[in-house]
Image (cartoon, helix red, strand yellow):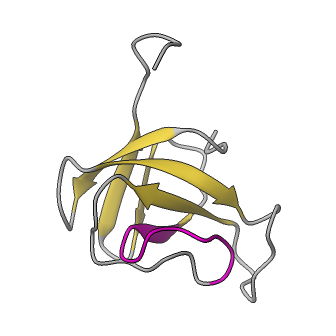
Amino acid sequence: MWEKGTRVKIIGGAKIGLMGTVVVKRTETPVNDIRDRFLVEFDESMGGHSGNGAYEGKRGHCWWFDYCLEKVTITDGISIEQVKRKNNFY
């Protein structure tokens, strides 16, 4: 459900409305954490980090989220939801 390339939007917490993209799933780049997580790189700085070594993202644009089966997830007070694409062209 939270696959690489999935577009997301912040709906609660810091910078509501900010868009981002899932760039890493925990299974691709293991980190010292037992939970299933995924990394989102946001289009603008949101006060995060650059990927914590699992990804070379822009400084302040990345945040790890806990994996869940719903289309909305909350981690560290930041809520995101999956955004349905209008078409396949960018």
Name the quarter where the N terminus is drawn. Answer: top right
Left or right, 82 with respect to 79, comes to right
What's drawn in magenta, residue-wise? 53-64
Q: Which residue is drawn at the image coordinates 53% and 13% (left, top)?
A: 88
To which quarter of the image does residue 16 belong?
bottom left
Residue 19 image point, x, y percent: 32, 46
Residue 21 image point, x, y percent: 49, 47
To which quarter of the image does residue 56 belong?
bottom right
Name the quarter where the C terminus is drawn. Answer: top left
Q: Which residue is drawn at the image coordinates 39% and 13% (left, top)?
A: 86
Q: Which residue is drawn at the image coordinates 74% and 66% (left, top)?
A: 26
- Seen in the picture, residue 8 relative to 48 is either above or below; the reply is above
Q: Is residue 21 magenta?
A: no
Foreground residue among 77 and 15 = 15
- Seen in the picture, residue 5 relative to 87 is either above or below; the reply is below
Foreground residue among 18 and 1 = 18
Number of callouts in the render?
Answer: 0
